[in-house]
Amino acid sequence: MPFNTQDTASATGTVFLVGAGPGDPDLLTVKALKLIQQADCLVYDRLVSDEIVALADPAAEKIFVGKKDGYHSLPQNQINQLLIDLASSGKKVVRLKGGDPYIFGRGGEEAEQISAAGIRFQVIPGITAAAGCSAATGIPLTHRDHAQSVKFITGHLKQGDLKHDWHILAQPGQTLVFYMGLNSLGTISAKLIEHGCPPDMPAALVQNGTTVNQRLLTGTLSNIELRCKQAEFASPSLIIIGSVVSLAQTLGSWPDEAETLIQGFSEEFQQVLRAV
Ligand SMILES: C[S@@+](CC[C@H](N)C(=O)[O-])C[C@H]1O[C@@H](n2cnc3c(N)ncnc32)[C@H](O)[C@@H]1O
């Protein structure tokens, strides 16, 4: 049962599906902050930073349901049931999710189950990782001289494969943003080149975007996988592909680890590496 009201403070027995943004607590929306502070119960996952959880009332119940360091996350159906049970007992439940709940956040599935159980719910959008990483690294996702559209794509392999229309993804004039794509970076690069993307198309990885632990690595479709392995990038990382990535050199101020990787070699070999 969706509802829309500005008076979120008086609602009880409700689930708020709240986007926590990409990491930096200052990127929470005002509405998200108010709801976190007023929640009886916070149900949050791995991508929600400790600083954001700490904004809740110390007396509020805090339930971690994400996967971290080998601990398995609660299965999705149990998370859905938990939200329904907590709200049914009259609590104001804030279900905090990294980024935006409706962008690769399984917010749609949770909303369907909560709604089917007759529980009131409201969705509060958050800054998605693509927007956060873009701003934090000086890579505009669209730009009239580079990209007229941007696509948010899952890089998560289903049965070992990515079922995308690679012909469409390889077209010029667009920016591709892959979420959850670190393990399939090699497949993504190879498929795009196979379907006509130039091998020297700029590509970037952003790890822990917008946080103090942010990392940036640029390259091209042909070398980004190798550079990623050399620099040991880890999750959560976002892949941005398109000529907009070249703008990071002028619009960004975050250090690009590609330069560090290259510095260790002779001048001649550095030129080779830059050209690969
Ligand atoms: C399950 S998806 C959740 C996306 C989220 N709902 C959003 O809107 O940003 C997780 C993926 O988001 C990306 N991601 C989330 N936060 C990130 C961050 N701070 N820096 C880089 N990538 C991030 C990574 O690709 C990660 O594998």
Image: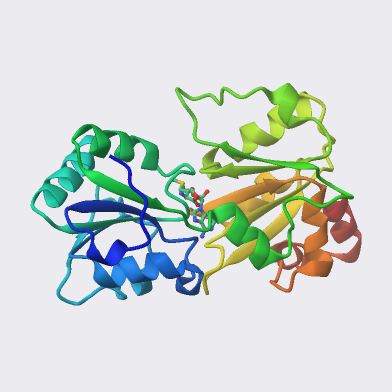
For the residue pair 104 and 119, the one nearer the viewer reads as 119
Residue under the point 27% across and 67% down: 9
Q: Is residue 77 above or below residue 147?
A: above
Q: Is residue 244 visible?
A: yes
Residue under the point 17% across and 65% down: 40
Residue under the point 69% across and 53% down: 204
Tell me if 41 is positioned left or right of 232 in this view. left
Q: Quadrant of the N terminus?
A: top left
Q: Is residue 237 above or below residue 187?
A: below
For the residue pair 274 and 169, the one nearer the viewer reads as 169
Number of marks drawn:
0
Tell me if 112 is positioned left or right of 22 in this view. left
For the residue pair 246 and 263, the one nearer the viewer reads as 246
Q: Position of residue 67 (x, y in %)?
A: 30, 50
Q: Position of residue 138 (x, y in %)?
A: 73, 65
Q: Is residue 200 above or below residue 265?
A: above
Q: Is residue 65 visible?
A: no
Q: Position of residue 255 (x, y in %)?
A: 70, 71
For the residue pair 185 and 154, the one nearer the viewer reads as 154
Q: Is residue 123 above or below residue 11?
A: above
Q: Toward which corner of the image does residue 78 lie, by quadrant?
A: top left
Q: Position of residue 15 (x, y in %)?
A: 25, 51
Tell me if 167 is positioned left or right of 164 in this view. right
